[in-house]
Amino acid sequence: MAATKGEPVTVQHDMQPLQGEADSFPLAVLTLLMDKTIASYGPYQFEALPPRDSITQSRTMLELRAGSLDVVASMNSLAREADGIQVRGCLRRGLNGLRLPVCLASRQAELEGIKDLAQAKKLRVAQVSHWPDATVLERNAWPVQRIQRLGVFDAMLELGRFDVFLLASDEAFGIVQALPKLVVLKQWLVAYPSTFAFMVNHARPELAKRLRHGWKLVQADGSFEALHDKAVGWQVRQAHLAERRWLILNNPDQPPPALLQDAKLWHPLVRQRLIEPLLKG
């Protein structure tokens, strides 16, 4: 396809750095996909919504449906399938479904001893209310204390409101390194199939097409894996995922089509232990 002439295409987003991030990783991936497709689709420019405190994922989905946003990055769920045009391809290589338990440092020795899922389910666990992960835990008969926003979880742990908070394996160490009273447990994790992908405003099908083309290009040249490793590779390596006990849950809210992405996009352990068994079954 020939490059488009004229003014740059404007793409509205609200991808701000999250707690523990210096820069927004979803925005870095979006930039990579857009840059890779300039030759075919022409120039572009981003228009970022002003930073907003305490914005929920539910509100973001509402803004996507209303047309205030052109693209968002979100954990996939059946409930969100109709919110936008789905661009299949997990930005986080499935690592958002590997949840590392975070607890008070004073309780580390006690809580490292969890051996199986039955023991883990006796712990009081918390998740952010508007994260689909909270629903995943509840659908697996694990009572969850829902909190309103991530920024209060450390204080609530210190107050003894719950035993552990589960953070994704590609974010946990970036967050906890700034919280000296907390630690990431080393011996176990909670795992379930999960994807985190771009969704595009229904009024912008050409943008969805462009992003899908971008994914094909970055799969072929390895630039996505390189970007991912640069951004969060240190956290994934520090998690020592292969050495932990994996307590595996079902994810009934995971859209099956989202699992059918190029195999190279998955982290190898996620592919081997979670995705391949599901696809074979």
Image: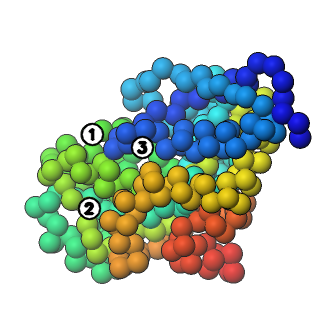
| Image position, residue 183 (x, y; %) | 21, 59
Q: Which residue is drawn at 65% across and 52% down?
A: 78
Q: Mark 1 points at which residue?
A: 152
Q: Counting residues from the N terminus, which is met first, the one under dot 1 or under dot 2?
A: 1
Q: Residue at x 88, y 36 (%)?
A: 2
Q: Counting residues from the N terminus, which is met first, the one under dot 2 or under dot 3?
A: 3
Q: Residues within 10 Å of mark 2 (few under 14, many from 20)?
A: many
Residue 129 numbered tag: 3
The amino acid type, in three-letter code, at marker 3 is Ser
Question: Is 132 or 184 nearer to us in this picture?
Answer: 184
Q: Which residue is drawn at 69% across and 81% down?
A: 280
| Colouring of the image | rainbow
Seen in the picture, residue 221 relative to 268 is either above or below; the reply is above
- Residue 87 in view (yes/no): yes
Of helix, strand and loop, which one carries label 2? strand
Query: Considering the image in quadrants, where does the N terminus appear?
Result: top right
Tally the numbered discs: 3
- Mark 1 vs mark 3, foreground winner is 1
Q: Counting residues from the N terminus, which is met first, the one under dot 1 or under dot 3?
A: 3
Q: Name the residue under label 2.
A: 184
